[in-house]
Image (cartoon, coloured by chain):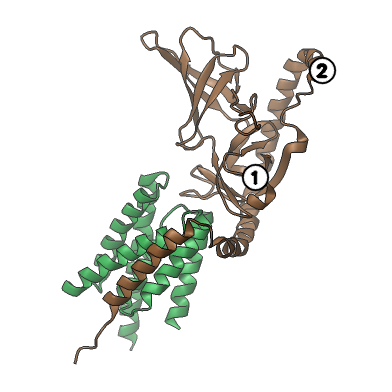
Amino acid sequence: MQQRTYFFPVFLVTICFILLVIFAGQSGIFGFFTNSVQSIFFPLGAWSHAKTAVSSKEEALQKENDQLREELAAKSTLEADNKALRDQFETLSPSSKNLLPVAVVGMPSVIPNVSFPEAMIIHAGLDDGISVGSVVVYKNQLVGTVTSLQSHFATVTLLTAKKSSLAIKDQASQAPGVLKGQGSGELIVDNVLLSDTITVGDTIVTMGGQNESGKGMLPDLIVGKVISIEKNPSNLFQKARLEIGVPLNRLTTVFVIK
Amino acid sequence: MSFALYFLSAVIALFVESLFFQIPITLIVITYVAIFQKKEWVIPFTVFIGILLDSLTFRPIGVTSLFFLCVIGLLYLYKKKFETNHALFGIVFTILACVFYIFVFDYQQIFLATLWSVFLASLLFFGSFFLVSWQSKES
């Protein structure tokens, strides 16, 4: 005699249960469960991420040091003027009082350390005073923005992600444009008018978009340096390809602007 | 014993998928369990693993479980009519499910993720098929 199976009734009941869970989950009642699960898995992920990132970190730091020395030499003459202005307006940005140092827990990608991640998971969440849209930086280099979060962990979409775009400007000529992530760690600046000047080596910074309560993208955060320009007289806009000074996929600590 | 092994495999898969590899490894494990286990416990097992994966990937709770359940449901409908207990069916079905999963959940580098899914599914199904064949020859 064929053994009776109850697969179909169990399946139907479970589908109804899951739909109920999805609707109930909108109210956030599963917060305790998700926090518990994340608290178990993510610390182990943070440890293993730190182990894999540290060997390449020294090389990246050396390269960054060389680059910063060059920039320091070029900008030393401007420092005196800037100091006077800073003293008057006290606009040191981003202020250290507003920075929250957080550990990077993980960076899921198709092949870790080979393919470039589009997002990172950080050890900070609602309970630490951050929210969706909070800006994440490393020194004054923009890293990304918080796109989803729970009580103690959050996902940061990197500025190199395909769905990432923001308003930027050329630091030298103040030419506005739109930054578009290309995935794979690449960035391009688009929608720069042909009449605007943008040259190889220029630093691209954020335009800023803060509202009256201070939330939003801060201005003058470094995005990258122009390495090539695509300028066609028959087009309305010119494009530029950027290089980021900080290896975003090797970071183990970042800072969230509260 | 086998349930504990499947559960451990699924937990390791979702840990790796949420933090390291953006490849549907959990779906591959779930599909493997569903194809070779004809028990009703596969359904709540799938739901629980899906909820855990949602917690770690910041998706709305239940969304991944719903997708997994749809895959299991399709598999069940197919099982009623055709023989499914062989490696080639498992690989083809798993790959198709993975491709849909990659598109639905907007994973990056679709082609590379699909290639990895094909490799892992082939490894799992052919590997277990040869293991079972070798064990039956021994006995």
Label number found at residue A88 = 2
Three-letter code, disc 1: Ile
10 Å neighbourhood of mark 2: few (<14), some, or many (≥20)? few
> Residue B118, image x and y in percent?
34, 56
Q: Which residue is drawn at the image coordinates 31% and 63% (left, top)?
A: B70
Label number found at residue A130 = 1
Q: Which residue is drawn at the image coordinates 43% and 79% (left, top)?
A: B3
10 Å neighbourhood of mark 1: few (<14), some, or many (≥20)? many
Label number found at residue A174 = none
Q: Which residue is drawn at the image coordinates 37% and 56% (left, top)?
A: B117
Residue A19: name its quadrant: bottom left
> Residue A224, image x and y in percent?
59, 26
Three-letter code, disc 2: Gln
Q: Nearer the viewer, residue B35 or A211?
A: A211
Whether residue B37 is situated above or below residue A73 in the rendered picture: below
Chain letter, disc 1 residue = A
Marks 2 & 1, CB-CB < 8 Å contact:
no
Q: Colour of chain A?
A: brown
> Residue B79, image x and y in percent?
22, 72
- The CA span between labels 2 and 1 is 30 Å
Left or right: residue A35 versus residue A13 is right
Q: Colour of chain B?
A: green
Left or right: residue B121 versus residue B83 is right
- The answer to whether residue A125 shows anywhere in this view is no
